[in-house]
């Protein structure tokens, strides 16, 4: 029999620590995780491994970390946004060499202590924390191949060295790490071995309707409007599929429904009007996709 502590994350928002308005960067509503996704989160918690989450852009990969932190009462998420020039050390700390040089030239006594120029970053703050923190390393596939490889020892030990101060930072409470990828390139196998993996499949229509209602609250006529919008949205994705440069995802759907509702459109209007008259700029994000769907 599984220990109760294994199922720490439920994933339906029922144990949200802050209610409807607490979730995900000020957005209202709860994060709705599938059973498989909740199981993946709990697997990562039990294994004390990072959870690597893949899926198309806008499917809720990054929001998952915020939902877990909220439900488990672990405070603010510490987020590191990966860039093409990011190094693994950037996720741990930065050292202001230029400021120290300036202070030394100005004979400022602070220059005598290199610790004055260290700034812990997301993963470094979590490792140094006395309580468990949630870390989000977002879009790891944007970085060079060296980035995930250089994280290997940190992922294993959750300790790191401050080279400039000759200090070793050792974890007191192991961080909960979420790593997202848009699958733009294959990640190194040694890195993958150290992660628990889950791919977020695109939600079915019923789940999309539930997500819309969660995020938009109890607005008048929203249920019928959401149903018609999800039908049009799903038909568009099914009809054009991979021929679109940027397939609209959950994030685009939420923006689109919000526009439709604020414009005062009736559900029958959403079902019958041509997509060109239904604010397509909320769904389509490139000229190529506009030409493909609406005609040149």
Image: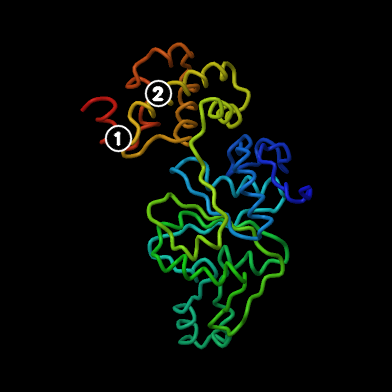
Quick one: which residue is furthest to the left in this view?
296
Residue 50: give x, y in percent of width and height: 58, 58
Residue 263: give x, y in percent of width and height: 46, 20
Q: Quadrant of residue 98?
A: bottom left
User: Does residue 52 lie above or below 232 as drawn?
Assistant: below
Residue 207: give x, y in percent of width and height: 56, 29
Q: Secondary structure at mark 1?
A: helix
In screen coordinates, is 145 left or right of 17?
A: left
Q: Where is mark 1, residue-wise?
A: 243
Task: Identify which residue is drawn at 56% across, 75% down.
Answer: 118
Give 261 or 270, whichever is nearer the viewer. 270
Task: Identify which residue is drawn at 49% across, 31% down.
Answer: 254
Task: Identify which residue is drawn at 57% across, 79% down.
Answer: 162
In screen coordinates, is 163 left or right of 187?
A: right
User: How was the colour assigned to the protein in this rendering?
Assistant: rainbow
Give 182 or 2, whichever is nearer the viewer. 2
Give 102 or 20, whichever is nearer the viewer. 20
Q: Secondary structure at mark 2?
A: helix
Residue 291 bears which disc, if any? none
Please count the marks in the image. 2
Q: Quadrant of the C terminus?
A: top left
Q: Earlier in the sequence, mark 2 or mark 1?
A: 2
Task: Identify which residue is drawn at 66% across, 74% down.
Answer: 170
Mark 2 residue crowding within 10 angstroms, few (<14) / some (14–19) / many (20+) = few
User: Does residue 172 lie above or below 275 as drawn?
Assistant: below
Residue 88: give x, y in percent of width and height: 48, 69
Give 83 or 53, whichever is nearer the viewer. 53
Q: Where is mark 2, residue-wise?
A: 235
Quick one: which residue is furthest to the front in this view?
1
């Amino acid at each position: 029999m599984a220990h109760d502590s294994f199922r720490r994350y439920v994933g339906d928002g029922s144990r949200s620590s802050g209610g409807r308005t607490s979730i995900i960067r000020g957005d209202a509503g709860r994060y709705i995780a599938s059973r498989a996704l909740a199981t993946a989160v709990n697997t990562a918690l039990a294994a004390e491994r990072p959870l690597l989450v893949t899926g198309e852009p806008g499917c809720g990969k990054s929001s998952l970390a915020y939902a877990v932190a909220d439900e488990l009462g672990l405070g603010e998420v510490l987020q590191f946004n990966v860039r093409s020039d990011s190094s693994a050390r950037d996720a741990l700390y930065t050292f202001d060499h230029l400021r120290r040089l300036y202070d030394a030239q100005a004979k400022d006594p602070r220059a005598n202590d290199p610790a004055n120029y260290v700034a812990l970053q997301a993963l470094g703050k979590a490792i140094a924390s006395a309580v468990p923190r949630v870390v989000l390393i977002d879009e790891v596939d944007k970085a060079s191949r060296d980035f995930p490889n250089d994280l290997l020892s940190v992922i294993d030990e959750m300790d790191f060295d401050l080279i400039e101060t000759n200090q070793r930072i050792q974890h007191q409470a192991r961080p909960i790490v979420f790593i997202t990828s848009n699958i733009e390139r294959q990640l190194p196998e040694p890195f993958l071995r150290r992660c628990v993996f889950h791919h977020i499949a695109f939600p079915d229509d019923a789940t999309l309707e539930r997500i819309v209602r969660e995020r938009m609250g109890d607005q008048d006529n929203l249920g019928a409007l959401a149903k018609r919008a999800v039908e049009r949205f799903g038909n568009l994705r099914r009809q054009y599929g991979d021929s679109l440069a940027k397939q609209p995802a959950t994030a685009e759907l939420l923006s689109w429904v919000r526009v439709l509702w604020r414009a005062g459109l009736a559900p029958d209007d959403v079902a019958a009007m041509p997509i060109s008259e239904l604010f397509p700029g909320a769904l389509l994000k490139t000229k190529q996709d506009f030409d493909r769907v609406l005609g040149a």
